[in-house]
Protein backbone atom coordinates (compact mmCIF):
# COMPACT_ATOMS: atom_id res chain seq x y z
CA UNK A 1 0.00 0.00 0.00
CA UNK A 2 2.93 2.33 0.54
CA UNK A 3 3.82 2.25 -3.20
CA UNK A 4 0.21 3.02 -4.21
CA UNK A 5 0.10 5.82 -1.72
CA UNK A 6 3.27 7.31 -3.16
CA UNK A 7 1.86 7.19 -6.70
CA UNK A 8 -1.44 8.73 -5.63
CA UNK A 9 0.39 11.43 -3.67
CA UNK A 10 2.63 12.27 -6.61
CA UNK A 11 -0.41 12.39 -8.86
CA UNK A 12 -2.16 14.72 -6.40
CA UNK A 13 0.89 17.00 -6.06
CA UNK A 14 1.32 17.24 -9.80
CA UNK A 15 -2.28 18.20 -10.27
CA UNK A 16 -1.87 21.10 -7.84
CA UNK A 17 0.52 22.78 -10.29
CA UNK A 18 -2.30 23.42 -12.76
CA UNK A 19 -4.35 26.36 -11.54
CA UNK A 20 -7.49 25.54 -13.50
CA UNK A 21 -7.29 21.72 -13.33
CA UNK A 22 -9.12 19.46 -10.91
CA UNK A 23 -6.81 17.50 -8.71
CA UNK A 24 -7.96 14.25 -10.28
CA UNK A 25 -7.45 15.20 -13.96
CA UNK A 26 -4.01 15.86 -15.42
CA UNK A 27 -5.59 15.83 -18.87
CA UNK A 28 -6.58 19.47 -18.34
CA UNK A 29 -2.92 20.24 -18.81
CA UNK A 30 -3.11 18.68 -22.26
CA UNK A 31 -6.19 20.77 -23.05
CA UNK A 32 -4.34 23.90 -22.04
CA UNK A 33 -1.46 22.93 -24.29
CA UNK A 34 -3.81 22.26 -27.19
CA UNK A 35 -5.30 25.72 -26.74
CA UNK A 36 -1.84 27.28 -26.72
CA UNK A 37 -0.92 25.36 -29.84
CA UNK A 38 -3.88 26.93 -31.64
CA UNK A 39 -2.67 30.36 -30.52
CA UNK A 40 0.81 29.43 -31.63
CA UNK A 41 -0.49 28.47 -35.06
CA UNK A 42 -2.27 31.83 -35.35
CA UNK A 43 0.84 33.70 -34.25
CA UNK A 44 2.97 31.71 -36.68
CA UNK A 45 0.63 32.61 -39.55
CA UNK A 46 0.91 36.28 -38.61
CA UNK A 47 4.68 35.99 -38.34
CA UNK A 48 4.91 34.33 -41.76
CA UNK A 49 2.87 37.20 -43.23
CA UNK A 50 5.16 39.73 -41.56
CA UNK A 51 8.25 38.02 -42.98
CA UNK A 52 6.76 38.19 -46.48
CA UNK A 53 6.00 41.89 -45.99
CA UNK A 54 9.57 42.51 -44.85
CA UNK A 55 10.94 40.62 -47.86
CA UNK A 56 8.75 42.73 -50.13
CA UNK A 57 9.97 45.92 -48.49
CA UNK A 58 13.59 44.83 -48.74
CA UNK A 59 13.30 44.08 -52.44
CA UNK A 60 11.54 47.29 -53.39
CA UNK A 61 13.04 50.41 -54.91
CA UNK A 62 11.36 53.71 -54.15
CA UNK A 63 11.68 56.67 -56.47
CA UNK A 64 9.28 59.26 -55.06
CA UNK A 65 8.67 60.85 -51.71
CA UNK A 66 5.14 59.43 -51.71
CA UNK A 67 6.39 55.88 -52.21
CA UNK A 68 8.90 56.31 -49.40
CA UNK A 69 6.26 57.70 -47.06
CA UNK A 70 4.04 54.71 -47.84
CA UNK A 71 6.94 52.32 -47.26
CA UNK A 72 7.66 53.91 -43.89
CA UNK A 73 3.98 53.50 -42.97
CA UNK A 74 4.29 49.81 -43.82
CA UNK A 75 7.39 49.57 -41.63
CA UNK A 76 5.48 51.15 -38.74
CA UNK A 77 2.52 48.78 -39.24
CA UNK A 78 4.81 45.73 -39.40
CA UNK A 79 6.62 46.87 -36.25
CA UNK A 80 3.23 47.07 -34.52
CA UNK A 81 2.19 43.59 -35.71
CA UNK A 82 5.55 42.16 -34.73
CA UNK A 83 5.26 43.75 -31.28
CA UNK A 84 1.84 42.06 -30.80
CA UNK A 85 3.24 38.67 -31.77
CA UNK A 86 6.13 39.23 -29.40
CA UNK A 87 3.72 40.26 -26.62
CA UNK A 88 1.60 37.13 -27.18
CA UNK A 89 4.73 35.01 -27.08
CA UNK A 90 5.77 36.57 -23.77
CA UNK A 91 2.35 35.70 -22.30
CA UNK A 92 2.72 32.14 -23.55
CA UNK A 93 6.16 31.98 -21.98
CA UNK A 94 4.66 32.78 -18.57
CA UNK A 95 2.01 30.09 -19.02
CA UNK A 96 4.58 27.68 -20.39
CA UNK A 97 6.71 28.20 -17.30
CA UNK A 98 3.92 26.68 -15.14
CA UNK A 99 3.43 23.76 -17.52
CA UNK A 100 7.20 23.23 -17.67
CA UNK A 101 7.30 22.94 -13.87
CA UNK A 102 4.71 20.17 -14.12
CA UNK A 103 6.80 18.47 -16.79
CA UNK A 104 9.91 18.69 -14.64
CA UNK A 105 8.06 17.23 -11.67
CA UNK A 106 6.84 14.37 -13.87
CA UNK A 107 10.40 13.72 -15.00
CA UNK A 108 11.61 13.65 -11.40
CA UNK A 109 8.79 11.27 -10.50
CA UNK A 110 9.53 8.90 -13.36
CA UNK A 111 13.22 9.03 -12.51
CA UNK A 112 12.47 7.97 -8.94
CA UNK A 113 9.70 5.54 -9.90
CA UNK A 114 10.37 4.27 -13.41
CA UNK A 115 7.54 1.75 -12.97
CA UNK A 116 7.39 -1.13 -10.53
CA UNK A 117 7.26 -4.66 -11.85
CA UNK A 118 3.91 -6.50 -11.70
CA UNK A 119 5.32 -8.86 -9.02
CA UNK A 120 6.27 -5.90 -6.81
CA UNK A 121 2.86 -4.36 -7.21
CA UNK A 122 1.15 -7.68 -6.44
CA UNK A 123 3.23 -8.21 -3.29
CA UNK A 124 2.59 -4.66 -2.08
CA UNK A 125 -1.08 -4.72 -2.97
CA UNK A 126 -2.12 -7.43 -0.59
CA UNK A 127 -4.50 -9.02 -3.06
CA UNK A 128 -5.57 -9.44 -6.70
CA UNK A 129 -8.25 -6.74 -6.60
CA UNK A 130 -5.86 -4.17 -5.20
CA UNK A 131 -3.18 -5.27 -7.68
CA UNK A 132 -5.49 -4.59 -10.66
CA UNK A 133 -6.44 -1.19 -9.31
CA UNK A 134 -2.85 -0.15 -8.69
CA UNK A 135 -1.65 -1.46 -12.06
CA UNK A 136 -4.24 0.60 -13.91
CA UNK A 137 -3.40 3.68 -11.86
CA UNK A 138 0.30 3.21 -12.55
CA UNK A 139 -0.26 2.91 -16.30
CA UNK A 140 -2.40 6.01 -16.29
CA UNK A 141 0.10 8.12 -14.36
CA UNK A 142 3.17 6.90 -16.23
CA UNK A 143 1.52 7.08 -19.66
CA UNK A 144 0.06 10.56 -19.06
CA UNK A 145 3.38 11.77 -17.68
CA UNK A 146 5.31 10.55 -20.68
CA UNK A 147 2.79 12.12 -23.06
CA UNK A 148 2.90 15.37 -21.10
CA UNK A 149 6.68 15.44 -21.10
CA UNK A 150 6.76 14.94 -24.87
CA UNK A 151 4.14 17.62 -25.55
CA UNK A 152 5.76 20.15 -23.25
CA UNK A 153 9.16 19.51 -24.79
CA UNK A 154 7.68 20.18 -28.23
CA UNK A 155 6.08 23.35 -26.90
CA UNK A 156 9.38 24.58 -25.45
CA UNK A 157 11.13 23.97 -28.78
CA UNK A 158 8.31 25.73 -30.68
CA UNK A 159 8.48 28.79 -28.43
CA UNK A 160 12.26 28.96 -28.79
CA UNK A 161 11.92 28.68 -32.57
CA UNK A 162 9.29 31.40 -32.68
CA UNK A 163 11.45 33.61 -30.48
CA UNK A 164 14.33 33.09 -32.91
CA UNK A 165 12.10 33.86 -35.90
CA UNK A 166 10.82 37.04 -34.23
CA UNK A 167 14.39 38.15 -33.54
CA UNK A 168 15.33 37.47 -37.17
CA UNK A 169 12.20 39.28 -38.41
CA UNK A 170 13.08 42.27 -36.24
CA UNK A 171 16.61 42.27 -37.65
CA UNK A 172 15.32 42.03 -41.24
CA UNK A 173 12.75 44.75 -40.60
CA UNK A 174 15.36 47.12 -39.23
CA UNK A 175 17.57 46.40 -42.23
CA UNK A 176 14.65 47.15 -44.52
CA UNK A 177 13.88 50.31 -42.57
CA UNK A 178 17.53 51.37 -42.80
CA UNK A 179 17.53 50.70 -46.55
CA UNK A 180 14.37 52.74 -46.94
CA UNK A 181 15.94 55.52 -44.89
CA UNK A 182 19.01 55.39 -47.13
CA UNK A 183 16.83 55.52 -50.23
CA UNK A 184 15.00 58.48 -48.74
CA UNK A 185 18.27 60.29 -48.04
CA UNK A 186 19.51 59.47 -51.53
CA UNK A 187 16.24 60.61 -53.08
CA UNK A 188 16.26 63.84 -51.11
CA UNK A 189 19.88 64.40 -52.06
CA UNK A 190 19.10 63.60 -55.68
CA UNK A 191 16.21 66.03 -55.57
CA UNK A 192 18.53 68.70 -54.19
CA UNK A 193 21.28 67.83 -56.67
CA UNK A 194 18.93 67.58 -59.64
CA UNK A 195 17.20 70.74 -58.47
CA UNK A 196 20.51 72.58 -58.71
CA UNK A 197 21.20 71.01 -62.08
CA UNK A 198 17.69 71.68 -63.24
CA UNK A 199 17.96 75.25 -62.02
CA UNK A 200 21.20 75.60 -63.97
CA UNK A 201 19.58 74.20 -67.11
CA UNK A 202 16.48 76.32 -66.51
CA UNK A 203 18.66 79.41 -66.13
CA UNK A 204 20.40 78.65 -69.42
CA UNK A 205 17.12 77.81 -71.14
CA UNK A 206 15.49 81.01 -69.89
CA UNK A 207 18.45 83.00 -71.18
CA UNK A 208 18.08 81.32 -74.55
CA UNK A 209 14.32 81.90 -74.58
CA UNK A 210 14.79 85.55 -73.72
CA UNK A 211 17.21 85.85 -76.62
CA UNK A 212 15.35 83.68 -79.11
CA UNK A 213 11.61 84.29 -79.03
CA UNK A 214 8.95 82.00 -80.50
CA UNK A 215 10.67 78.71 -79.71
CA UNK A 216 8.42 75.66 -79.90
CA UNK A 217 8.06 73.33 -76.93
CA UNK A 218 9.85 70.66 -78.92
CA UNK A 219 12.80 73.00 -79.36
CA UNK A 220 12.86 73.83 -75.66
CA UNK A 221 12.92 70.13 -74.90
CA UNK A 222 15.69 69.65 -77.43
CA UNK A 223 17.85 72.32 -75.80
CA UNK A 224 17.26 70.81 -72.35
CA UNK A 225 18.19 67.36 -73.70
CA UNK A 226 21.32 68.80 -75.30
CA UNK A 227 22.39 70.39 -72.02
CA UNK A 228 21.85 67.07 -70.23
CA UNK A 229 23.50 64.85 -72.85
CA UNK A 230 27.16 65.45 -71.96
CA UNK A 231 26.97 66.24 -68.26
CA UNK A 232 29.83 65.10 -66.05
CA UNK A 233 30.14 65.08 -62.26
CA UNK A 234 30.02 68.57 -60.91
CA UNK A 235 32.90 67.96 -58.50
CA UNK A 236 36.25 66.28 -59.07
CA UNK A 237 36.13 63.27 -56.77
CA UNK A 238 39.22 61.79 -55.13
CA UNK A 239 40.94 60.86 -58.40
CA UNK A 240 42.55 63.37 -60.75
CA UNK A 241 40.37 63.36 -63.89
CA UNK A 242 42.06 62.53 -67.16
CA UNK A 243 42.73 65.29 -69.63
CA UNK A 244 41.55 64.18 -73.07
CA UNK A 245 43.21 66.05 -75.94
CA UNK A 246 41.11 67.28 -78.84
CA UNK A 247 41.15 64.82 -81.72
CA UNK A 248 42.63 65.75 -85.08
CA UNK A 249 39.74 67.24 -87.07
CA UNK A 250 41.01 65.73 -90.32
CA UNK A 251 40.25 68.88 -92.31
CA UNK A 252 40.98 72.59 -92.28
CA UNK A 253 39.70 75.04 -91.31
CA UNK A 254 37.99 73.33 -88.39
CA UNK A 255 36.02 75.08 -85.65
CA UNK A 256 35.22 74.01 -82.07
CA UNK A 257 33.21 76.24 -79.73
CA UNK A 258 34.61 75.75 -76.21
CA UNK A 259 33.21 76.69 -72.80
CA UNK A 260 35.32 78.02 -69.95
CA UNK A 261 34.43 76.33 -66.67
CA UNK A 262 31.94 73.65 -65.65
CA UNK A 263 29.23 73.18 -64.50
CA UNK A 264 27.67 75.95 -62.38
CA UNK A 265 30.70 78.11 -61.41
CA UNK A 266 29.20 79.00 -57.99
CA UNK A 267 31.23 78.90 -54.76
CA UNK A 268 34.63 77.31 -54.32
CA UNK A 269 36.48 76.30 -57.46
CA UNK A 270 38.30 73.06 -56.61
CA UNK A 271 40.92 73.39 -59.32
CA UNK A 272 41.20 77.03 -58.33
CA UNK A 273 41.93 75.94 -54.75
CA UNK A 274 44.60 73.65 -56.19
CA UNK A 275 46.17 76.52 -58.14
CA UNK A 276 45.97 78.93 -55.21
CA UNK A 277 47.56 76.42 -52.82
CA UNK A 278 50.39 75.90 -55.29
CA UNK A 279 50.78 79.70 -55.35
CA UNK A 280 51.29 79.68 -51.56
CA UNK A 281 47.82 80.75 -50.36
CA UNK A 282 46.47 79.42 -47.07
CA UNK A 283 43.20 77.57 -46.82
CA UNK A 284 41.62 80.55 -45.02
CA UNK A 285 42.60 82.86 -47.91
CA UNK A 286 41.21 80.35 -50.39
CA UNK A 287 37.89 80.07 -48.56
CA UNK A 288 37.42 83.81 -47.99
CA UNK A 289 38.13 84.40 -51.68
CA UNK A 290 35.41 82.07 -52.90
CA UNK A 291 32.85 82.80 -50.16
CA UNK A 292 32.31 86.52 -49.67
CA UNK A 293 32.22 87.98 -46.12
CA UNK A 294 32.44 84.66 -44.24
CA UNK A 295 34.10 83.83 -40.96
CA UNK A 296 36.40 80.81 -40.69
CA UNK A 297 36.83 79.44 -37.19
CA UNK A 298 35.74 76.99 -34.48
CA UNK A 299 32.10 75.97 -34.41
CA UNK A 300 30.19 73.35 -32.35
CA UNK A 301 30.39 70.01 -34.16
CA UNK A 302 28.11 67.04 -33.41
CA UNK A 303 29.85 63.89 -32.26
CA UNK A 304 28.15 61.81 -34.91
CA UNK A 305 26.21 62.12 -38.14
CA UNK A 306 23.55 59.88 -39.67
CA UNK A 307 24.90 58.74 -43.04
CA UNK A 308 22.71 56.88 -45.53
CA UNK A 309 23.64 53.20 -45.60
CA UNK A 310 25.98 53.48 -42.60
CA UNK A 311 23.84 54.81 -39.76
CA UNK A 312 25.33 57.02 -37.07
CA UNK A 313 29.07 57.38 -37.44
CA UNK A 314 31.65 59.76 -36.01
CA UNK A 315 31.40 63.15 -37.72
CA UNK A 316 35.09 64.05 -37.61
CA UNK A 317 36.84 60.70 -37.31
CA UNK A 318 34.82 58.78 -39.86
CA UNK A 319 32.51 60.84 -42.06
CA UNK A 320 34.92 63.68 -42.88
CA UNK A 321 37.88 61.31 -43.25
CA UNK A 322 35.84 59.45 -45.86
CA UNK A 323 34.80 62.48 -47.94
CA UNK A 324 35.97 61.74 -51.49
CA UNK A 325 35.61 65.06 -53.29
CA UNK A 326 39.24 66.06 -53.90
CA UNK A 327 42.33 64.04 -54.86
CA UNK A 328 44.42 63.13 -51.81
CA UNK A 329 47.59 63.93 -53.74
CA UNK A 330 46.77 67.63 -53.96
CA UNK A 331 48.48 70.36 -51.84
CA UNK A 332 47.60 70.32 -48.14
CA UNK A 333 46.13 73.86 -48.09
CA UNK A 334 43.75 73.00 -50.93
CA UNK A 335 42.64 69.91 -49.03
CA UNK A 336 42.18 71.94 -45.86
CA UNK A 337 39.93 74.34 -47.79
CA UNK A 338 38.00 71.31 -49.07
CA UNK A 339 37.75 69.84 -45.55
CA UNK A 340 36.28 73.06 -44.15
CA UNK A 341 33.92 73.40 -47.12
CA UNK A 342 32.76 69.78 -46.70
CA UNK A 343 32.29 70.21 -42.94
CA UNK A 344 30.37 73.45 -43.45
CA UNK A 345 28.22 71.99 -46.22
CA UNK A 346 27.32 68.97 -44.07
CA UNK A 347 26.31 71.12 -41.08
CA UNK A 348 24.22 73.39 -43.30
CA UNK A 349 22.61 70.34 -44.94
CA UNK A 350 21.74 68.79 -41.59
CA UNK A 351 20.18 72.04 -40.40
CA UNK A 352 17.94 72.15 -43.45
CA UNK A 353 17.12 68.40 -43.38
CA UNK A 354 16.46 67.70 -39.67
CA UNK A 355 16.32 64.05 -38.70
CA UNK A 356 17.42 62.80 -42.11
CA UNK A 357 20.47 60.81 -43.15
CA UNK A 358 22.87 62.63 -45.44
CA UNK A 359 23.42 60.85 -48.76
CA UNK A 360 26.81 59.65 -49.93
CA UNK A 361 26.83 60.81 -53.56
CA UNK A 362 27.30 64.16 -55.30
CA UNK A 363 23.63 64.70 -54.53
CA UNK A 364 25.03 65.71 -51.12
CA UNK A 365 28.74 64.93 -50.75
CA UNK A 366 30.62 61.84 -51.84
CA UNK A 367 31.49 59.60 -48.87
CA UNK A 368 33.71 56.52 -49.33
CA UNK A 369 34.09 54.32 -46.25
CA UNK A 370 37.22 52.67 -47.68
CA UNK A 371 38.99 56.03 -47.58
CA UNK A 372 38.58 56.44 -43.79
CA UNK A 373 41.64 54.33 -42.88
CA UNK A 374 43.39 54.18 -46.25
CA UNK A 375 47.08 55.14 -45.91
CA UNK A 376 46.96 56.57 -49.44
CA UNK A 377 44.61 59.26 -48.09
CA UNK A 378 47.03 60.32 -45.34
CA UNK A 379 47.26 63.94 -46.55
CA UNK A 380 43.47 64.23 -46.62
CA UNK A 381 43.27 62.81 -43.10
CA UNK A 382 45.87 65.36 -42.04
CA UNK A 383 43.79 68.16 -43.59
CA UNK A 384 40.71 66.98 -41.68
CA UNK A 385 42.66 66.70 -38.42
CA UNK A 386 44.36 70.09 -38.73
CA UNK A 387 41.05 71.84 -39.42
CA UNK A 388 39.09 69.87 -36.81
CA UNK A 389 36.03 71.84 -35.73
CA UNK A 390 36.74 74.69 -38.19
CA UNK A 391 33.69 75.87 -40.12
CA UNK A 392 32.90 78.59 -42.66
CA UNK A 393 30.03 80.68 -41.29
CA UNK A 394 27.97 83.68 -42.30
CA UNK A 395 26.06 85.61 -39.61
CA UNK A 396 27.02 82.88 -37.16
CA UNK A 397 25.63 79.90 -39.12
CA UNK A 398 27.41 77.33 -41.33
CA UNK A 399 27.19 78.24 -44.99
CA UNK A 400 25.95 76.07 -47.84
CA UNK A 401 29.48 75.77 -49.14
CA UNK A 402 28.81 75.03 -52.79
CA UNK A 403 31.83 73.93 -54.74
CA UNK A 404 32.47 72.62 -58.21
CA UNK A 405 35.39 71.43 -60.25
CA UNK A 406 36.17 74.43 -62.49
CA UNK A 407 35.02 78.03 -62.93
CA UNK A 408 37.09 78.94 -65.99
CA UNK A 409 38.70 81.90 -64.23
CA UNK A 410 35.47 83.51 -62.98
CA UNK A 411 32.91 82.40 -60.42
CA UNK A 412 29.28 83.47 -60.81
CA UNK A 413 26.74 84.50 -58.21
CA UNK A 414 24.07 82.07 -57.04
CA UNK A 415 21.49 84.65 -58.10
CA UNK A 416 22.68 84.63 -61.70
CA UNK A 417 22.84 80.83 -61.94
CA UNK A 418 19.99 79.66 -59.70
CA UNK A 419 17.94 82.79 -59.19
CA UNK A 420 18.39 83.13 -55.43
CA UNK A 421 20.51 85.83 -53.79
CA UNK A 422 23.00 84.48 -51.26
CA UNK A 423 25.34 87.13 -49.80
CA UNK A 424 28.42 84.92 -49.64
CA UNK A 425 27.96 83.37 -53.13
CA UNK A 426 29.00 86.27 -55.36
CA UNK A 427 30.92 86.62 -58.64
CA UNK A 428 34.69 86.57 -58.27
CA UNK A 429 37.62 87.05 -60.64
CA UNK A 430 39.64 83.88 -60.14
CA UNK A 431 42.97 84.65 -61.76
CA UNK A 432 46.23 86.46 -61.14
CA UNK A 433 47.54 88.95 -63.69
CA UNK A 434 45.65 88.34 -66.91
CA UNK A 435 42.89 85.98 -67.99
CA UNK A 436 42.96 83.26 -69.20
CA UNK A 437 46.70 82.67 -68.77
CA UNK A 438 46.61 83.60 -65.08
CA UNK A 439 43.51 81.55 -64.16
CA UNK A 440 44.10 79.51 -61.02
CA UNK A 441 42.18 76.58 -62.48
CA UNK A 442 43.91 76.47 -65.88
CA UNK A 443 45.18 72.93 -65.15
CA UNK A 444 41.64 71.56 -65.09
CA UNK A 445 40.66 69.35 -68.06
CA UNK A 446 37.35 71.26 -67.98
CA UNK A 447 38.90 74.72 -67.93
CA UNK A 448 38.50 75.26 -71.69
CA UNK A 449 36.57 72.47 -73.33
CA UNK A 450 34.17 71.86 -76.24
CA UNK A 451 31.27 69.74 -74.93
CA UNK A 452 29.42 67.15 -76.97
CA UNK A 453 30.17 66.24 -80.53
CA UNK A 454 28.98 64.76 -83.75
CA UNK A 455 25.88 62.59 -83.74
CA UNK A 456 27.09 59.17 -82.63
CA UNK A 457 30.56 60.48 -81.73
CA UNK A 458 30.36 62.71 -78.66
CA UNK A 459 34.15 63.03 -78.52
CA UNK A 460 34.37 64.79 -81.86
CA UNK A 461 33.49 68.49 -81.40
CA UNK A 462 34.72 69.88 -84.71
CA UNK A 463 32.54 71.81 -87.15
CA UNK A 464 33.50 72.36 -90.74
CA UNK A 465 33.29 75.73 -92.48
CA UNK A 466 29.84 74.97 -93.89
CA UNK A 467 28.47 74.09 -90.44
CA UNK A 468 29.82 77.17 -88.65
CA UNK A 469 28.63 79.37 -91.54
CA UNK A 470 25.18 77.80 -91.22
CA UNK A 471 25.05 78.88 -87.55
CA UNK A 472 25.79 82.49 -88.48
CA UNK A 473 23.24 82.45 -91.33
CA UNK A 474 20.61 81.03 -88.95
CA UNK A 475 21.43 83.79 -86.50
CA UNK A 476 21.07 86.47 -89.20
CA UNK A 477 17.63 85.06 -90.07
CA UNK A 478 16.62 84.85 -86.42
CA UNK A 479 17.63 88.49 -85.89
CA UNK A 480 15.48 89.46 -88.87
CA UNK A 481 12.39 87.96 -87.21
CA UNK A 482 11.94 85.69 -84.20
CA UNK A 483 9.15 83.90 -86.09
CA UNK A 484 11.87 82.00 -87.99
CA UNK A 485 13.24 80.40 -84.83
CA UNK A 486 10.69 77.59 -85.04
CA UNK A 487 12.44 76.44 -88.25
CA UNK A 488 15.99 76.59 -86.90
CA UNK A 489 16.33 73.23 -85.17
CA UNK A 490 19.37 71.10 -86.12
CA UNK A 491 19.27 69.61 -89.58
CA UNK A 492 20.61 66.14 -88.62
CA UNK A 493 17.70 65.05 -86.39
CA UNK A 494 20.16 63.65 -83.84
CA UNK A 495 18.08 64.93 -80.90
CA UNK A 496 14.71 64.60 -82.57
CA UNK A 497 13.70 67.90 -84.15
CA UNK A 498 14.66 68.68 -87.74
CA UNK A 499 14.88 72.22 -89.02
CA UNK A 500 15.41 73.94 -92.32
CA UNK A 501 18.49 73.02 -94.27
CA UNK A 502 21.24 75.56 -94.78
CA UNK A 503 20.05 76.03 -98.37
CA UNK A 504 16.53 76.81 -97.13
CA UNK A 505 17.90 79.37 -94.67
CA UNK A 506 19.94 81.05 -97.41
CA UNK A 507 16.92 80.94 -99.73
CA UNK A 508 14.77 82.73 -97.16
CA UNK A 509 17.47 85.36 -96.58
CA UNK A 510 17.65 85.96 -100.32
CA UNK A 511 13.87 86.27 -100.48
CA UNK A 512 14.03 88.91 -97.74
CA UNK A 513 16.84 90.76 -99.51
CA UNK A 514 19.22 90.08 -96.61
CA UNK A 515 22.78 89.00 -97.49
CA UNK A 516 23.85 85.61 -96.26
CA UNK A 517 27.34 85.14 -94.77
CA UNK A 518 28.88 84.12 -98.07
CA UNK A 519 32.51 83.03 -97.80
CA UNK A 520 33.35 83.08 -94.07
CA UNK A 521 36.58 84.85 -93.16
CA UNK A 522 37.66 85.43 -89.56
CA UNK A 523 35.86 85.08 -86.20
CA UNK A 524 36.53 87.39 -83.24
CA UNK A 525 35.30 86.84 -79.68
CA UNK A 526 34.83 89.63 -77.11
CA UNK A 527 34.69 89.29 -73.30
CA UNK A 528 33.13 91.60 -70.72
CA UNK A 529 35.81 91.12 -68.05
CA UNK A 530 33.41 89.68 -65.46
CA UNK A 531 33.04 86.12 -66.74
CA UNK A 532 30.90 86.33 -69.88
CA UNK A 533 31.44 86.27 -73.62
CA UNK A 534 30.09 89.66 -74.67
CA UNK A 535 30.28 89.52 -78.47
CA UNK A 536 30.83 87.30 -81.47
CA UNK A 537 31.99 88.96 -84.71
CA UNK A 538 32.71 87.45 -88.10
CA UNK A 539 34.06 88.79 -91.38
CA UNK A 540 33.11 87.39 -94.76
CA UNK A 541 32.76 88.11 -98.44
CA UNK A 542 29.38 89.74 -97.78
CA UNK A 543 30.18 91.44 -94.46
CA UNK A 544 33.24 93.50 -93.54
CA UNK A 545 32.24 92.74 -89.96
CA UNK A 546 28.98 91.64 -88.38
CA UNK A 547 28.67 91.47 -84.60
CA UNK A 548 26.22 89.57 -82.40
CA UNK A 549 26.04 89.51 -78.65
CA UNK A 550 27.57 86.54 -76.86
CA UNK A 551 24.11 85.57 -75.61
CA UNK A 552 22.72 85.57 -79.17
CA UNK A 553 25.38 83.25 -80.54
CA UNK A 554 25.17 80.96 -77.48
CA UNK A 555 21.40 80.70 -77.95
CA UNK A 556 21.54 79.82 -81.64
CA UNK A 557 24.44 77.41 -81.04
CA UNK A 558 22.52 75.48 -78.37
CA UNK A 559 19.44 75.45 -80.60
CA UNK A 560 20.92 74.55 -84.01
CA UNK A 561 24.41 73.08 -83.67
CA UNK A 562 24.57 69.55 -85.14
CA UNK A 563 24.96 66.46 -82.97
CA UNK A 564 25.12 66.97 -79.20
CA UNK A 565 27.45 69.97 -79.22
CA UNK A 566 26.54 72.36 -76.44
CA UNK A 567 27.77 75.42 -74.56
CA UNK A 568 27.43 74.94 -70.79
CA UNK A 569 28.93 78.28 -69.93
CA UNK A 570 28.24 81.82 -71.13
CA UNK A 571 32.00 82.27 -71.10
CA UNK A 572 33.28 80.69 -74.31
CA UNK A 573 35.31 81.17 -77.47
CA UNK A 574 36.06 79.45 -80.78
CA UNK A 575 39.08 77.23 -81.43
CA UNK A 576 40.14 77.35 -85.09
CA UNK A 577 42.56 74.90 -86.70
Image (cartoon, grey):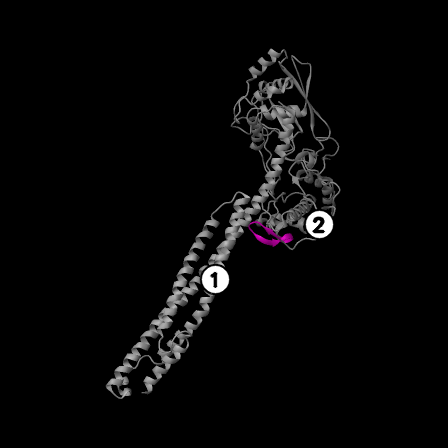
Q: Which label was assigned to residue 272?
A: none
Q: Where is residue 339 in the image (x, y as percent from the top left)?
A: 67, 47
User: Which quarter of the figure is the N terminus placed in?
Assistant: bottom left
Up-down relation of residue 71 to residue 419 (above or below): below
Residue found farthest to the bottom: 126
Is there any visible trace of residue 117 in the rendered image? no
Q: Determine which quarter of the picture holds residue 505.
A: top right
Provide the residue span drawn in magenta: 305-317
Q: Determine which quarter of the picture holds residue 219.
A: top right
Which residue corresponds to mark 2?
390
Q: Relative to 115, is 266 on the left or the right?
A: right
Q: What element carries label 2?
A: strand
User: Which quarter of the figure is the C terminus placed in?
Assistant: top right
Q: Relative to 298, is 566 on the left or the right?
A: left
Q: Does the magenta stretch include residue 542?
A: no
- The image shows a total of numbered marks equal to 2
Which residue corresponds to mark 1?
86
Q: Where is residue 521 in the image (x, y as percent from the top left)?
A: 65, 16
Q: What element carries label 1?
A: helix
Amino acid sequence: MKKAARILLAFFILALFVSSARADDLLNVQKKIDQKNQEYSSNQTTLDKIKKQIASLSGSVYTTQGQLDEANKQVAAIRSELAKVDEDLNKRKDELRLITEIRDEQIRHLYKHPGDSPLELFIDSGGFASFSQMSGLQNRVVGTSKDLIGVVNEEVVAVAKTRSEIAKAKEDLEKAAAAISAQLASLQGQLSYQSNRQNTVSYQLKKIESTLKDLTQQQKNLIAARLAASQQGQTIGDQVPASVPLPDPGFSPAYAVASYGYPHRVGMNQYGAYGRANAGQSYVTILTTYYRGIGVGPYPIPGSINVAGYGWISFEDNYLRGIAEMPSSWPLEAQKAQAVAARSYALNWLASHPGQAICTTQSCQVYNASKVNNPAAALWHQAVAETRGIVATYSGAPISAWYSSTDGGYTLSSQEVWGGYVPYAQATADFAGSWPAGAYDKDSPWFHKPWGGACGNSGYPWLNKEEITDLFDALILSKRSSSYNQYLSPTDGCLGAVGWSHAQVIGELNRLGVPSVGNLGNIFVGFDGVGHTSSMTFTSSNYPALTFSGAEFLAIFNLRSPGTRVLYSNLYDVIIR
